[in-house]
Amino acid sequence: MPIPNTSTLEGLRVLVVDDDLDSCTWMTCLLEFYGIEVHSTFTVHQALATFVELRPDLVLSDIAMPGEDGYSLLRQIRQIEDRLDKSTPVIAVTGLGKLEARFSKLQARFDQWLLKPVDIDELIRAIAHLTGRSILISELTSSY
């Protein structure tokens, strides 16, 4: 079976924010397979510091985290960007139920919502779409 063309997303910088070490590690390994430069953080405070320093192409954030949550992170990212006149795509990753996520989506301005467990092909398609990279269906993980 063919291995997907990883060069399509190569060079992207993605900030992953998740308080769960296993989830963070899984997403990091997956994204690195596609040639994405991944920076992982476990708290909103760490994520904001990394965001300002890194200026990532995309942020992938869990919603339910202790202390400050993904909504707080998104609000603070948008406040920073208002001063910079720049917008970074932010994907919410959540274990919330579909009804809760649908309601939450109306309140927040995430660019995309993915429910856990995250479908790999859906994640890769979302990243490619939001960063303006085109990816062929044959390049997705289900093809290998």
Image (tube, helix red, strand yellow):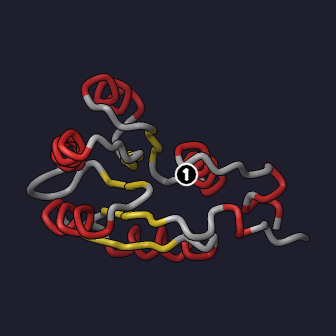
The residue lying at 70 percent from left, 48 percent from top is: 134
Which x, y percent locates residue 50?
A: 25, 69
Q: Nearest the camera: 34 or 64?
A: 34
Q: Residues within 10 Å of mark 1 (few under 14, many from 20)?
A: many
Position of 137 with respect to 84 (left or right) is right
- Report the number of discs: 1
The residue lying at 24 percent from left, 48 percent from top is: 70
Q: Nearest the camera: 83 or 63?
A: 83
Q: Nearest the camera: 79 or 126?
A: 79
| Location of mark 1 (residue) | 127
Position of 20 with respect to 113 (left or right) is left
What quarter of the picture does the N terminus occupy? bottom right
Position of 135 with respect to 123 (left or right) is right
Where 1 sits versus 119, above or below? below
Which x, y percent locates residue 32?
A: 55, 75
Q: Secondary structure at mark 1?
A: helix
The residue lying at 35 percent from left, 33 percent from top is: 101
- Residue extending furthest right? 1
Which x, y percent locates residue 136?
A: 79, 50
Which x, y percent locates residue 89?
A: 41, 45
What quarter of the picture does the C terminus occupy? bottom right
Q: Nearest the camera: 85 or 50?
A: 85
Position of 118 with respect to 51 (left or right) is right
The residue lying at 29 percent from left, 30 percent from top is: 104
Where 11 sits versus 79, above or below? below
The quadrant where residue 71 appears: top left
Look at label 1 and name its amino acid.
Ile
